[in-house]
Image (cartoon, rainbow, N blue to C red):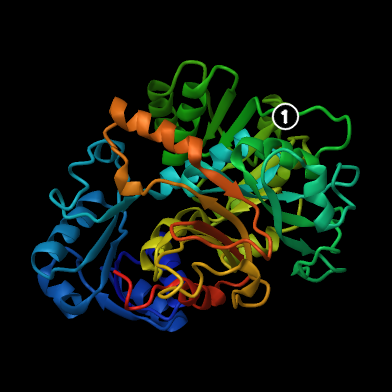
Amino acid sequence: MKILILGAGRVGESVAESLLSEKNDITVVDTDGVRLRDLEGRFDLRGVVGNGISPEVLAEAGAADTDMLIACTSQDETNLTACKIAQVLFNIPTRIVRVRSVALKSHAELLSDTGFGVTHAFCPEEALMGYIGKLVTFPEALQVREFAQGHVALASVRARGGAPVVGLSVADVRQNLPHGAVRVVGVYRRFHHEADRLVPMEGSTRIEPGDEVFVLSDKDYLGDVLAAFNRQVGEQAEPVRRVMVAGGGRVGMRLARALTKESRRFQVKIIEKDEDRCVYLASRLPSDVLVLKGDATDETLMENENVEDVDLFVAITDDDEDNIMSCLLAKKLGATRVLALINRRTYADLMHGTQIDIALSPAQATLGELLAYVRQGDVQAVHSLRRGVAEAIEIVARGDAKTSRAVGRRVGSLRLPRDVHIGMIVRGLPEPDARNTNGSEAAERDEEESEDVVEVIVPTSGTIIQSNDHVILFLPNKRLVHEVEALFRVGVTFF
């Protein structure tokens, strides 16, 4: 696929790197020639210096025969204008824009084909906030991803000695978790001082303390499932109540607002260096959010603010080093869990397995939305895992036994690549476009009725895949995705 990316910043670079690994033809447009030369030196892509809202620049970049435009500069105005030009002058089929303005996101008619010519809009800050919000809801998890319109969740969790299912074989795990659909799809283990390695997924494989376990579950039972891996027998749940945020940028402000809006059970503090930003935050956030001017790497400040009582410390400034150091300090002083936002992949890899509980890459939280548009076949959701190495995808089985290599066949007979596992099959979901997105009473009734017939299946080798099943797969290496897509691709005789 030929893809044109506007913006060579952090988001643009992450998008380009991920899409290049899937052998797409990438061109990046930016006004910063030095930045483009750097990207050309590190990646197999073409750079064009210029303004993305110039028709001449877009033409030079090959917009006339481009399949997809991804406008991800830091300016909404540039992204939206370029999107409209791409639609009117170059007829680019798929036009994806990054939008930072909350006001724009609330007006769906503007972010549409008839508005600014938008096929899909995404907001990295919103994706990050949602990612962190799930970790607040499920404090035992290292990450939580949703599939099948929210019916199924994939979580990674660190196995703790003494937890109910730790020490059991994979085959025995579900026998000890009788409530809901559960399946372990991946286990990563550290051998001596080496990097974590995938353990072969066999029924006899045992869960050991320290393992990072990826488990699919009916979302309604996810809390109980996580507790079985991470909470010792008899240990009471410790919900997140006290949250400290280092960094009062867009994500920090949105996170604080969301936590206080949801309920009064959260106590939120924000530490921000810039005095003017502190004043702005204090004027925009609810009065029960405490805004502090200071540096989260200041030990005296952290001690004075009782960081030892904090359930979750989140460092989300624009500086990777500050995020790492403030998290290490917070952990040393007694914070229960710490999360550091880290843009550089090498830093994120170094932090894995240290005292930092969660090293979060912005790209990891954002790329799934874009990958679902790039992938072939009827891919509904894509989530990047383990810093972009692994993936979990949701793909809809289409066609029939004559036109599909999956429909009408037993799971055990499918020619899946080695180590790729079908974790769940969700049957009976309505088509997304069949729902009324305006929130009418009729749509709500249809949704309620459809939920009654939705079936979440833990497949065995004898389970037969039916047309319109939503199949959720775990891929330990994203390079295997094309083989999986080919397996579910419908033949030319299917209409």
Residue toward you, 68 or 471: 471
Above or below 288: residue 381:
below
Residue type at mark 1 is Glu
Q: Which residue is mark 1?
A: 303
Indicate left or right for 24 with 192 as reference: left
| Up/down of 54 relative to 44, above or below | above
In this orientation, which residue lies closer to the viewer: 279 or 363? 363
- Residue 144 visible in rendering: no
Position of the N terminus by quadrant:
bottom left
Q: Position of residue 91 (x, y in %)?
A: 14, 68
Q: Residue at x 68, y 40 (%)?
A: 180
Q: Is residue 364 left or right of residue 63?
A: right
Residue 478 at x, y percent in the picture: 55, 72
Residue 165 visible in the shown view: yes
Q: Residue at x 64, y 42 (%)?
A: 297
User: Residue 177 appears in which quarter of the rendering?
Assistant: top right
Residue 53 quadrant:
bottom left
- In which quadrant of the rendered image does the C terminus lie? bottom left
Count of numbered circles in the view = 1
Residue at horizontal 75 percent and vertical 61 percent from the top: 187
Percent x, y of residue 87? 14, 63
Mark 1, secondary structure of its residue? helix
Q: Residues within 10 Å of mark 1 (few under 14, many from 20)?
A: few
Left or right? Give the position of 399 relative to 294.
left
